[in-house]
Image: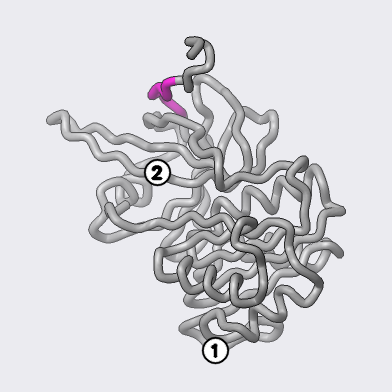
Amino acid sequence: MDGSAQPKRLLWQEAVIEAVHVETPTVKSFRLRPDIWTGFTAGQHVDIRLTAPDGYQAQRSYSIGSAPNTSGTIELAIEALPDGEVSPFFHDVADVGDRIELRGPIGGHFIWDQPLGGPILLVAGGSGLVPLMSILRHRAAVAPDIPAVLVVSARRYDDLIWREELLRRADEDANLKVIVTLTREQARPGLRFGRIDMKLMDDALAGGRPALTYICGSTPFVEAAADLVLAAGVPFETVRTERYGGAKG
């Protein structure tokens, strides 16, 4: 094989934190500006690495929530995990002006761009919304005529990341349908209560079968959602999944 065809080695670099926003009681978003800008595709993620004074290193992967653009920045939404190794640093220590290590972007399967077309179905559980938000924002910027449905499950209303933006987009975008279901709080007007089920999926697919489906969340959520999507008749080969779990963030 010609050497030029070999995949590029991912290199660690530094990025500066330009902005921090509280999104929910347990999630903060961080706008980072990498020293070397390579761009990214909606749905990709980056690795973050922290190094302690004694040399111990902790590394975690975080999806990019912002849409690809020319700003030279990326947005990460990081959920605080009490027993985590990386997320407590971001929630308790990190601030604007701090520099952190990252590498990426990473990922070539769970991605979307305009040439892939639609309609698209996005199904998110909790912080699994982050890469789907990147897709949603990118679609709105480059192909708002492509129909899209977002199903997002959150514990409570206050746990819904980018809540105001999501509800605003649902009101303003005629080609976007947003279905929010709350699992630990009674539904508010316009929202559902309970876990995703076949009735909810039938509602999501009422406008027709999607050309591509993206499902992201915890492993149990992804498995349940994928089963529902397939049971509803969506072809297996059009379904893309990404799950988080394992090492604590």
Q: Is residue 12 magenta?
A: yes
Q: CA distance from mark 2 to mark 1?
A: 33 Å
Query: Which portion, as a residue range, is magenta?
Result: 9-15
Q: How many marks?
A: 2
Whichever of callouts 2 and 1 sits on the residue coming sooner in the sequence is: 2
Relative to residue 64, is residue 180 drawn left or right? right
Q: Is residue 161 magenta?
A: no
Q: Residue at x 83, y 52 (%)?
A: 144
Graded by Cα atoms within 10 Å as few (under 14), some (14 to 19) or many (20 or more), the crowding at tag 1 reads: some
Relative to residue 164, is residue 88 drawn left or right? left
* Front of the two marks 2 and 1: 2
Can residue 133 be seen here? The reply is yes
Q: Secondary structure at mark 2?
A: strand
Residue 203: x %, y % from top left: 72, 80
Q: Residue at x 47, y 35 (%)?
A: 17
Task: Identify the residue under disc 2.
Answer: 61
Task: Identify the residue under disc 1.
Answer: 186
